[in-house]
Image: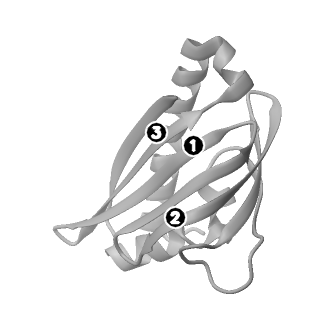
């Protein structure tokens, strides 16, 4: 398992950041490599909802399925990747800080076949995560989504 974590301060209220990040239609706008992300369960996006994600990472097509394990509006959204080439758990945390939102993500992932080049893969994921967080900040602060 590899651990990844990053955070960014976004000059927007918590509710706006939470709503944007947890609307899976927005994920391809700010997360590099997401080709497709769809709910596979009926009803609203909430705890127990399931999804399927198709991603491209380091030239490889990666398909995963998962379930939302925690959903607390304005505070937390966590999910477990249950099948595919990558498995593990990831969480998004939201905290109000002086009228802005501290958005933090943390993940513990088993990268399967990608772990062969562990150091390179870990560096690539850290770099991509940092860039994705900055892209999200830019989108939400500049209203371009």
Residue 37 at least partly seen: yes
Disc 1/disc 2 C-alpha distance (Å): 12 Å
Q: Would you call the spot at circle 1 few (<14 residues within 10 Å), some (14-19), or many (20 or more)?
A: some
Disc 3/disc 2 C-alpha distance (Å): 24 Å
Q: Nearer the viewer, residue 104 or 140?
A: 104
Q: Nearer the viewer, residue 14 or 62?
A: 62
Q: Secondary structure at mark 3?
A: helix
Q: Nearer the viewer, residue 71 or 120?
A: 71
Q: Is residue 9 above or below residue 49?
A: above
Res 121 quadrant in image = top right
Residue for point 21% across, 72% down = 99
In the visual, does 83 lie left or right of 72? Answer: right
Residue for point 67% across, 50% down = 82
- Residue 78 lies, in percent from the top left, at 48, 60
- Residue 123 lies, in percent from the top left, at 52, 21
- Residue 113 lies, in percent from the top left, at 74, 23
Residue 142 at least partly seen: no
The disc at residue 130 is: 3
Res 65 quadrant in image = bottom right
In the visual, does 114 lie left or right of 30? Answer: right
Q: Is residue 20 above or below residue 42?
A: above
Residue under circle 1? Answer: 88
Disc 1/disc 3 C-alpha distance (Å): 20 Å
Q: Is residue 58 above or below residue 137?
A: above
Q: Would you call the spot at circle 3 few (<14 residues within 10 Å), some (14-19), or many (20 or more)?
A: some
Q: Nearer the viewer, mark 3 or mark 2?
A: 2
Which numbered disc, 1 or 3, marks the residue that appears first in the sequence?
1
Which numbered disc, 3 or 2, marks the residue that appears first in the sequence?
2
């Amino acid at each position: 398992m590899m651990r990844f974590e990053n955070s960014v301060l976004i000059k927007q209220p918590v509710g706006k950041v939470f709503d944007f990040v947890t609307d899976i239609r927005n994920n391809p706008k700010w997360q590099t490599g997401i080709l497709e992300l769809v709910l596979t369960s009926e009803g609203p996006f909430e705890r127990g909802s399931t999804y399927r994600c198709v991603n491209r990472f380091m030239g490889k097509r990666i398909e995963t399925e998962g379930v939302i394990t925690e959903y607390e509006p304005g505070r937390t959204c966590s999910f477990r990747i249950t099948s595919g080439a990558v498995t593990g758990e990831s969480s998004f945390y939201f905290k109000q800080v002086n009228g802005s939102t501290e958005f933090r993500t943390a993940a513990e992932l088993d990268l399967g076949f990608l772990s062969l080049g562990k150091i390179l893969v870990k560096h690539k994921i850290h770099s991509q995560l940092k860039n994705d967080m900055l892209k999200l900040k830019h989108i939400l602060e500049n209203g371009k989504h």
